[in-house]
Amino acid sequence: MGYEFMDTQPAYSKIDEQLRTEGIIFGDFDSRKEGWWLLERDAPSPNEKVIVESLPYMQGNYDFSVFDDERYFENRTLTYKFKIVASPYSDRKMLEHEIKRKLIPMKIQRLIDTHDSNYFWKGKVQSITLADDNKYQTLVATITFNCYPFAFAKNYEGSDIWDDVEFEHWVFQEVNFDVFETKKITLINIGSRSTVCSVEVTGNVWVRGNNTELQINSSNYLGVEIVLNRGENYFELAGEGTIKFKFRREEMI
């Protein structure tokens, strides 16, 4: 996965927080700042929601799992294993209580993994198990998250923040448009599935295309959603005003 790990054999010395570069952020819990070293990360692909029918005297079966050119998946499980080193028993006991207190009550929200810093997951903690080693004064925590099957891009498309650009999988595109006459535009979704797009509008703008026909203005744009399929989505704009399309990619990573 591209991690660089440091030897964490017991050594009673002050640990520089900046050395812990890999970890997770969930709510106000940042594993690096809490003193946990990341040992392992496991993010297997999710199981598909399979719908199949088999008929007598038929070779194979009918697979109805794909709908509208998309496959559908169950939630996925993300598992992280962390370690605290060179810590006396009283501190380890406190850390065990604290990690459960901070993580277990949290509702579904963003999970940020430094390994994929341009994305975030949505989920909640499924379980936390801990293993204490009194001989070596270490504590190992295994945290399992139950998450939505796709990761979300951290930034909206069109933000094009230079430090976040992944040239191997990226498209630079305009998402803000001034509308004074009929204009044809293309919005590109390079994600792994279709995504929902919201808009911000001033003036009055008509949007047509991609099975969509909307008349939007500055008083009714809230709550408007447009589905963008994978690939290129073609629209025609008319009216007078401005429109901004806001959407994130969903990626199977």
Image (cartoon, rainbow, N blue to C red):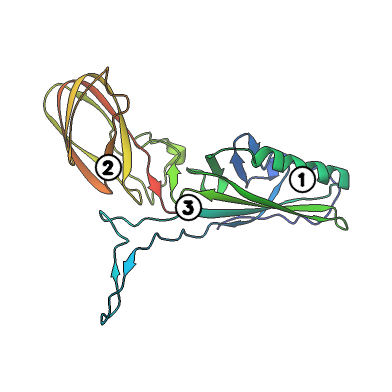
Query: SS for tag 3?
Result: loop
Along the horizontal axis of the image, is 205 left or right of 40?
Answer: left
- The residue wearing badge 2 is 228
Q: Nearer the viewer, residue 57 or 139?
A: 57
Q: Position of residue 13 (x, y in %)?
A: 84, 45
- Kindly identify the amino acid type of the residue bearing the numbered disc 1: Glu
Q: In the figure, 151 relative to 2: above or below?
A: above
Which residue is at 87% across, 55% downward? 134
- The label shown at residue 96 is 1
Which of the two marks, 3 or 2, is nearer to us in this view?
3
Query: SS for tag 2?
Result: strand
Q: Position of residue 21 (x, y in %)?
A: 64, 45
Q: Position of residue 78 (x, y in %)?
A: 56, 53
Label 3 crowd bin: few (<14), some (14–19), many (20+), radius 10 Å: some
Residue 34 appears anywhere in the view: no
Along the horizontal axis of the image, is 114 left or right of 195?
Answer: right
| Alpha-carbon span between mark 1 and mark 2 | 44 Å
Task: Compare marks 3 and 2 and give the one earlier in the sequence.
Answer: 3
